[in-house]
Image (cartoon, rainbow, N blue to C red):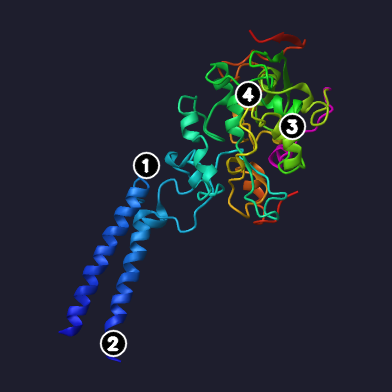
Amino acid sequence: MGKSHIHKPKRNFILWLMALLMLASGVEIVPQAQAEYGDVVINNQSDKAGMRPPIFPHWFHRIRFRCKVCHADLGFKFQAGGNQINMLKIIDGEFCGACHNGEIAWSVENCDVCHSGKPGTPTQVHGSTVQKLIGKPAPAAGQK
Amino acid sequence: MKLMKRLMAGTVAGVLVATLFASAAHAAEPAAAPAPAAGVNTFNRLMKPKSDRNPAQANDGIHDPTCEGTGLLQLPKEAFKDMPEASSGNYVDWVQALNKQLIKPRYDRKNPNEEPVVLDLDIVREVKGTMPDVVYPHDRHTMWLDCSNCHPDIFIPEKGKNQISMAMILMGQKCGVCHGKVAFPVAECRKCHSKKKDGSGGGKPAAQAEPAKSEPAKKPTK
């Protein structure tokens, strides 16, 4: 009986203090994704295979290649997840493998550099207008 | 007496924890905007502060910070350091960066010296309402792209054959296949809606080609 009388104000005080601190320091309780505009997450198969989904940084490649190289010469369609890429095609020199072959760019043994997405991140073009308008696809659902 | 002592101890502990929390929070975000003044009525409530732009991959929300590869990636801020600024997208003016040769993206996968085939042809599209007409510049697009990227799948290369609306663009069709995904988004209205309706021409942003030409003129850059 007596104990609860002592603890209650203390507990309240600490809770109140923490709430105030969170407000003051501007800590966001739910962090919002704000990756680079145009980053493409491809999660057609990765989650199912127990691998982190790959993230393609458009901006990084745009500094080094014109759009035409991948989208005309290599045949990448303008659609996230719409290219049916898999590791076999890549090691046979298709899609990413046209450059990521140890000659033009580093080779496929660096799995983690591409497969660096948070598990469960759905296929998307990050920061796209469509994503902003109709919301993000459901986690791990994988957009087609 | 006992109660007082316990309360005092609690307060001291609380303040200690508070200072720790506060210093940790401040150390974690040195470039953050000044603390909001009054809760709900903050200035620019929905605007992302400049310090939040181009975050490192480890805290961008989609990369796994526990993945080794994440730490190997080039930081966007580092890459964009000397590039001309834009107000949306990657906050980089890619066309200017290319024109000023701040970046030298290859036009061919293997040959770093291959030059693009640039088509200098502007297409004017008259639009409904009071918005200025749209001038579509082929030159800035052919610097990056091949004709086959757009023709004939996205745009039929014939006058009057293509119906385009802002709704389609917003939903990722027509211009929206790139604009709103990788190329500058529709927030930058005047980049496309650049020709005054009264016929006085002009209106085209600086450092861009002159108004529409009737004859296509093919020429390589430089």
What is the three-letter code of the residue carrying label 1?
Ala
Provide the residue designation for mark 2. Answer: A3
Q: Of circles 1 and 3, which is in front? A: 3
Q: Are marks 3 and 4 in contact (CB under 8 Å)?
A: no
Host chain of mark 3: A
Host chain of mark 2: A
Q: Which span is picked out in magenta?
A: B158-173
Give the Cα separation between the discs numbered 2 and 1. 45 Å
Provide the residue designation for mark 1. Answer: B31
Q: Is residue A66 above or below residue A18?
A: above
Provide the residue designation for mark 3. Answer: A93
Q: Of circles 2 and 4, which is in front? A: 2
Give the Cα separation between the discs numbered 1 and 3. 43 Å
The quarter of the image holding the N terminus of chain A is bottom left
In what element is the residue under mark 4? strand
Provide the residue designation for mark 4. Answer: B194
Give the Cα separation between the discs numbered 3 and 4. 43 Å
Give the Cα separation between the discs numbered 2 and 4. 74 Å
Q: Front-most of A91 and B108?
A: A91
Of mark 3 and mark 2, the one earlier in the sequence is 2
What is the three-letter code of the residue carrying label 2?
Lys
